[in-house]
Image (spheres, grey):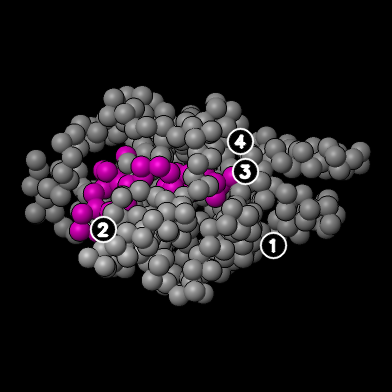
Amino acid sequence: MRDDSNLTKRERQARAATMSGVEPEDLSRVEEEGGRQVPEQGSEDERPAKASAWKEIVARYQKASIGRGVWQIVNTLVPFAALWYLMYLSLAVSWWIAVPLAILAGAFLVRVFIIFHDCGHGSFFKSRMANDILGFITGVLTFTPYHHWRWEHALHHASSGDLDRRGTGDIWTLTVQEYLEASRWKRFAYRLARNPVVLFAVAPLYLLLIKHRFAVPKASRRERGSVYWTNLAILGMAAGLSWFFGVKEYLLLQFVIMMVAGSAGVWLFYVQHQFEDVYWERRDDWDYTRAALQGSSFYKLPKVLQWLSGNIGFHHIHHLSPRIPNYHLEKCHKAEPLFQSVKPVTLFSSLKSFTFRLWDEQRRKLVGYRHLRDFRRQQNRVARH
């Protein structure tokens, strides 16, 4: 085990960033805002016995490949552009052709977002400049400001599975006790926010079209700038495509694309952290490795959906080491029995996630609203005794 006591703060941040997929300056801001730094290689904070083993394995897959990256850009952005052109041609024939093409374009936009996502972790290409340029371009296509999103996503990775640090980059989740103690208005708002129609139809559009257009108050100058420049680029793109397609035609096609991509994206994120036997823990007992392997799902999808979603179903590997580019995630998963021991969530079994609403700290599992009755009865019995 290495002695890190003589390392400077910047050197420690750089080492932690290598494992977490968070840029050193972003990691520093996470720490300043109350986030716990992810364990460093060789850190004494790591308790799992196989920690050193998985670190050696993931290190082999953290190397970006120029060839794989370029090919993924070609097989993603070129078909996406071709679909837009086919939509233009189909408008002269029938909307019944244009709309299905827009649905397919929405599916490809999910894959575009995964490229954007990898750029934010600095994993898609080795060059930071290349990641930033590609991240900005794909951010415009997905209506997401690159630097602002990267900073907020860093907070998500630093706090995923931690009950005491919920609220940034995650699905609003209350414990059973918190829900029972909440005001009537808060409980109504929570039920509304967790309603499937709101969560998977309204929320994605709000997120992509409204929320991402504004910087949060704590955002730095660079992050604010990324919001402004992205908005300007989106406006230019929308103006150009409106001139080419027609305003009404462009808005309708863009709406369908964003609806499909947004709903699919929110569903993927939801299933990746809201599933049976998920890991949640209070901050004092929170563990990075367990949060990754037990708090992030292995969403085993059919090959076509796995391809369109950029292998993000291997989310347990991604949270374990966000520096691994998406095109190496499956290989890394297959390289170690420890990773394969994670129980997969299938497309069919993931539907059960619709019933999960609250975290029961006593039973250490996600439960539905029906569980509240049993919980109240148990509390009443305890009070009587």
Kindly report the distance in space between the C-alpha atoms of the residues bearing marks 4 and 1.
Answer: 23 Å
Q: What residue is disc 4 on?
A: 76
Q: What SS does tag 1 mark? A: helix
Q: What SS does tag 2 mark? A: loop
| Amino acid bearing label 1 | Leu
Task: Give how far across and how far down residue 273 sits, in percent.
Answer: 42, 47
Identify the mark nearer the N-term, 1 or 3: 3
Identify the mark nearer the N-term, 2 or 1: 1
Which quadrant holds the N terminus?
A: top left
> Mark number for residue 109?
3
- Magenta: main secondary structure: helix
Residue 300 visible in rendering = yes
Kindly report the distance in space between the C-alpha atoms of the residues bearing marks 2 and 1.
Answer: 43 Å
Q: Dot 3: few (<14), some (14–19), or many (≥20) neighbours within 10 Å?
A: many
Q: What residue is disc 1 on?
A: 235
Kindly report the distance in space between the C-alpha atoms of the residues bearing marks 3 and 4.
Answer: 8 Å
